[in-house]
Image (cartoon, grey):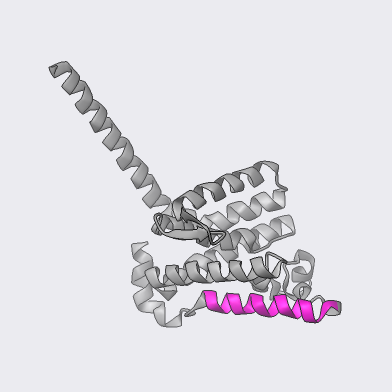
């Protein structure tokens, strides 16, 4: 990611600041517009539709990020707060330019997968933010259901299992959306993850070798 930080110094002034706030406001607008104007189905104007995109409605390649992924009002508000919190934390950690690149790589890959399969949503795209946050702040603790304190790394493991389940039983469209949404996570953290695994293996090798030498000495 070093090259991105260098680019940030050069192109950072062109970044969209508070990007997650813009997305949250957009989702709020679509959600409540849908409730107020039921006959118009406002969400359908913004949703991803390959046929309509090919017919010229190219804005759908980006506006699908404003489609709410839950219908319950309480869960919707909570999910928006959560996405805003983790998105803001990532932007503060990386800077606006790097965060823009991370998010829009996910948007591009999700849209590309949608053009192949015919369907795309922002559900897994938004959850990729969660994985990024969990990698950077694994010991950050949240109150699950406002009662149970849980660290982000454990929630990430649970979500990874859910992802794996949908990869096995989901449609090809769902599988493509999951893989596309995780491309940005792989690009940003793949090298770090492999380095960590390599260091762990090296540490275990040295520890086992030390134990063997101690046993031989005894």
Residue in view at x 68 percent, y 52 percent: 174
Q: Position of residue 171 (x, y in %)?
A: 73, 48
Which quadrant would residue 22 be assigned to in this image?
Answer: bottom right
Using residue 185 as the reference point, say whether residue 206 is left or right of it.
left
Q: Can residue 184 be seen at all in this image of the molecule?
A: no
Looking at this view, is 110 or 157 the one in front? Answer: 157
- Against 94, residue 145 (above or below) is above
Question: Can you name the residue that lies furthest to the front here?
Answer: 147
The answer to if 42 sits in the magenta stretch is no
Q: Main secondary structure of the magenta part?
A: helix
Q: Position of residue 172 (x, y in %)?
A: 71, 48
Using residue 1 as the reference point, say whether residue 163 is left or right of it.
right
The answer to if 37 sits in the magenta stretch is yes
Q: Position of residue 112 (x, y in %)?
A: 64, 61
Using residue 44 as the reference point, say whether residue 2 is left or right of it.
left
Residue in view at x 47 percent, y 49 percent: 154
- Against 209, residue 193 (above or below) is below
Residue in view at x 42 percent, y 55 percent: 135
The quarter of the picture where the N terminus appears is bottom left
Q: Can residue 8 be seen at all in this image of the molecule?
A: yes
Residue in view at x 68 percent, y 65 percent: 69
Q: Position of residue 203 (x, y in %)?
A: 27, 37
Which quadrant would residue 218 be assigned to in this image?
Answer: top left
Which stretch did the figure color magenta?
A: 20-38
Looking at this view, is 82 or 183 the one in front? Answer: 82
């Amino acid at each position: 990611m070093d090259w991105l930080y260098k680019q940030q110094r050069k192109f950072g002034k062109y970044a969209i600041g508070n990007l997650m706030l813009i997305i949250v406001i957009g989702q709020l607008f679509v959600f409540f517009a849908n409730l107020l104007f039921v006959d118009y189905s406002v969400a359908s104007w913004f949703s991803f539709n390959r046929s309509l995109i090919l017919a010229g409605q190219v804005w759908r390649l980006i506006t699908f990020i404003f489609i709410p992924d839950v219908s319950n009002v309480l869960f919707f508000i909570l999910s928006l707060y959560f996405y805003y919190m983790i998105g803001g934390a990532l932007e503060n950690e990386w800077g606006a330019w790097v965060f823009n690149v991370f998010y829009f790589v996910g948007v591009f890959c999700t849209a590309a997968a949608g053009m192949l399969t015919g369907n795309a949503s922002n559900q897994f795209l938004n959850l990729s933010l969660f994985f990024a946050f969990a990698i950077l702040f694994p010991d950050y603790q949240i109150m699950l259901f406002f009662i149970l304190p849980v660290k982000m790394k454990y929630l990430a493991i649970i979500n990874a299992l859910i992802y794996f389940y949908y990869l096995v039983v989901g449609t090809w469209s769902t599988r493509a959306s999951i893989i596309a949404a995780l491309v940005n996570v792989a690009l940003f953290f793949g090298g770090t993850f492999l380095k960590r695994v390599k260091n762990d293996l090296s540490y275990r090798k040295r520890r086992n070798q030390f134990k063997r030498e101690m046993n031989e000495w005894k």
